[in-house]
Image (tube, rainbow, N blue to C red):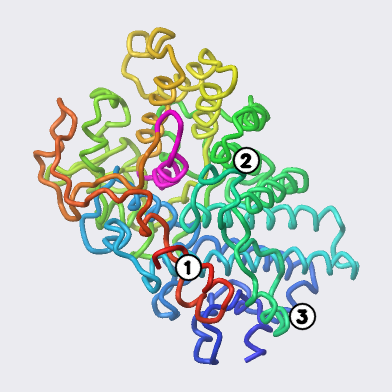
Amino acid sequence: MKNIFKFLGLLTLTFGIHSCSEEAVLDLTPINNISIDDAFSSPALIESSLNGMYNAAAIGQYNSTAANGGRGYIWGAAFVQQGDCRGEDVVNTATFYQLTYTASYDTGTANNVYYWVDAYRLINRCNLMIEGVNGAVANGIITQSVANDYIGQAKFLRAITHFELLSHFARPYNFSPGANHPGIPYRDVGINTQSEIDSELLRGRNTVAECYTKVLADLDDAETLITTNSLTKASKNAAIAFKTRVKLHKRDWDGVITEGNKLNGLYTLTAQPDGVFDNNYSNTESIFSILQDATNNPGVNAALASQYNRRRLVCISPIIWRDPSWLVDDKRRSETYDSAVPPNPDGMVFTVSGRKYTAKYRSTVNQDDAAPVIRYAEVLLNMAEAYARKTPTDLPNALAKLNQVRNRALADPATQAYTAASFTTPTTMVGAILKERRIEFLMEGRRWSDIHRLQGDDLHPIDGIPQKVANGNPAASTFTLGTPYPGPYGVAAIPSSDYRFLWPIPQLETNTNPTLAAEQNPGW
């Protein structure tokens, strides 16, 4: 049993480790299936270990067996698909995401179970990377400066993965005074011995406040330590950008603005809204994305172009498609893209049987679209909202940042751009920014994050999970523009007080962790 953990390819926090039959749960089929003792014994092997860490972020493993491969957990495709399908701006057209879409999950549902399992596998890889390179420095194998870059990258992935888990398994930051309600276990010890396993099995949940403190500390370290500058690996700028997201959720408005201003002049929006997706590995706007390539992607059962384009398992919801805030001639409605002629580089949506689908992911053959994690448009809208909410409010700067994103999608900015007269209060300004986020990041997995943080909001509160169009294929007539979508809604709203608002800690975890079993989310 203990030998399972002697290989970096098998290292993970334990889930259901009560017999060696659980070995399949641990196997990541990694790039570097080598002894933990050897993994940090040379610069080349250390680089391989780093690549294995990113591979775990991009692919993951699904449903316990190698035959099922990876589904893009947690950063490769799954966070986009799960983040979309937990919200109301997409429609699950088949059965693939039905349990997520209808909140019919339980403690053993694979989608939410492997969100947790693969997240903590990745976190453990990050912790092992940090410990391994520190040992390599002590042994004279690499320099401290090289090690610092690797440590910074590992801390970045550790931070954002914990933060992502918080949005599904814990209540938002503002749920209790001081955010002292249960968060998740923040794990910062690499597990490769039985004694470490035994110790970690007793670890319980940190508070949400403690988790945020640790996330931000890791991101601050990442900003300081990282020297790599790559879209598909953690960078100093990615850490800064992600801090604007974390501080927005924390409601630290001045902090959002401070971090965002660090990126002034370093990124620009692409000239057209589809420019990010015309070349999603080389553009002026993307800050951090996850690499996928023809031979290493989540496959037909998860790759973004497979699920959202070729197989059309998720369509745009009439709820957002018919929202009057989304102008009829907005360029983000462009339908010059032709799904029958891949990889046609133009357009944002396409129509099949009257239903609207995203054209953001176009590589239906190689399935190598980068999975977008954060781009500059989000930083600008995070700052816009912070300016509108801060004390004293700064509506001119909020308007400028909002228009910076929205104007590039307008047919005629001279007449259609918002003006100072458009929004004269923080409430109306924030409402426009929130709606812009729904349009701009449609089918990029960002909707659930906003639903989560807006629970109990003072200006634009959301109560629980909004009602949705019925699971299945909406009629073509429901996409007719001219009036807001009137219904019907086949999936009822779920109030925030309902236990289903949060995902349960998986049974795999609670079976072997008595502390977490006693700290299960209420109702599960």
Please report the residue visible at 31 percent of the width from the left and 27 percent of the height from the top.
Answer: 331
**What's under tag 1, amino acid-wise?**
Ile
Q: Magenta stretch containing residue 454, yes or no?
A: yes
66 in relation to 322, above or below? below
Q: CA distance from mark 1 to mark 3?
A: 32 Å
Instruction: Look at the numbered disc 2 and give the secondary structure of its residue.
Output: helix
Q: Position of residue 304 (x, y in %)?
A: 37, 54
Q: Residue at 52% across / 12% down in the picture?
A: 396
Instruction: Answer whether residue 179 is visible to the viewer in this image.
Output: yes
Q: Nearer the viewer, mark 1 or mark 2?
A: 1
Choose mark 2 or mark 3, whichever is in front: 2
Q: Label 3: which residue?
A: 37
- Residue depicted at 27% across the width and 36% down the height: 320
Which mark's residue is nearer the viewer, 1 or 3?
Answer: 1
- Position of 169 with respect to 254 (left or right) is left
Residue bearing the label numbered 1: 505
